[in-house]
Image: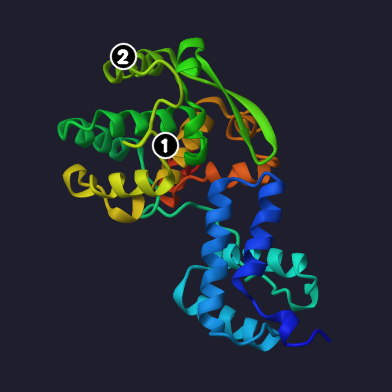
Amino acid sequence: MPNCKSTALTPRRVKAYLDWLTERERSRSTLKKYRRDLASLQTFLAGRPLSKAALLAWKAQLSERYAPATVNSMLAAVNGYLVHARLPQLRLRPLRIQRQVFCRQDRELNKAEYLRLVQAARRRGNVRLALVLQTICSTGIRVSELQYITAQAVEQGYAEVNNKGKRRTIFLPRKLCRALQRYLAGQKKLAGPVFTTRTGQPLDRSNIWRAMKALCRAAGVGTRKVFPHNLRHLFARTYYAAQRDLVRLADLLGHASTATTRIYTMESGRIHARQIEQLGLLVT
């Protein structure tokens, strides 16, 4: 059995793990999330060594505070650390999540709500945010991939995205390219990412999330529906409704498996009920 000293979750060991992930080209957003999840565990341990009992108690606490999917994502971060630290015997099993047949209507953004968000951003004079929303929603890119939408990509009409060790080409709609060209001209920007902060750094998830939340009241959209990844979900559902091509959609989204893509294309129970009503199979 490892001794207490070897199982301590120290800042130095966390840094070594994150450095190891960096060498394996994990994204900045992944590194940031793993650092946050490990910090949560460190706070819970309060200096105690890692043990199966302590980890199970942490898991139980997480289960009381967060949704199962959130808990499992945090467990994945810690399990990765445990394997790296040669403590695989301490790994935790993820929570079992029953497969959903329909998406939750109170959590999924619909097209009308998305358009109201864009219009609210325009009314506030926030041209950058209005274009960010449209860029993500019309291409289906991840927020972390927004940095690949560069002045050169706008000029050529497509972006080369490198994420999670995979490269794929994202085509930009012509109408979007024209809008982005006007924005670039107004910013007097000739190269680099289209969307940046005042210091010139690419916008990240937290920048966009905060800006989107600030639009909720003006747009009349519930806050639970408004976060960047829901724009990607809306793209997936809209594309699938038009094309019914799950394999092609998986390629566009950068998914390794169509099983993941199916989650993005789930319709609400209300839509499904309306489709059943329209089958015309009742006689009485």
* Residue at figure coordinates x 35%, y 51% from the top left: 225
Residue at figure coordinates x 68%, y 62% from the top left: 16
* Image mark for residue 185: 2
Which residue is located at x 44 percent, y 18 percent? 191
Q: Secondary structure at mark 2?
A: helix
Mark positioned earlier in the residue sequence (2 or 1): 2
Q: What colour scheme was applied to this rendering of the protein?
A: rainbow
Q: Name the residue at the right extreme.
A: 1
Callout 2 amino acid:
Ala
Q: Is residue 282 left or right of residue 127?
A: right
Can the viewer see residue 280? no
Q: Which residue matches tag 1?
A: 201
Q: Nearer the viewer, residue 150 or 114?
A: 150
105, above or below 175, in the image: below
Which of the 4 image quadrants contains residue 177?
top left
Residue 185 shows up from this direction: yes
| Residue 208 in the image, given as x and y percentages of width and height | 36, 43
Residue at (65, 47) in percent of width and height? 26
Q: Nearer the viewer, residue 97 or 194?
A: 194
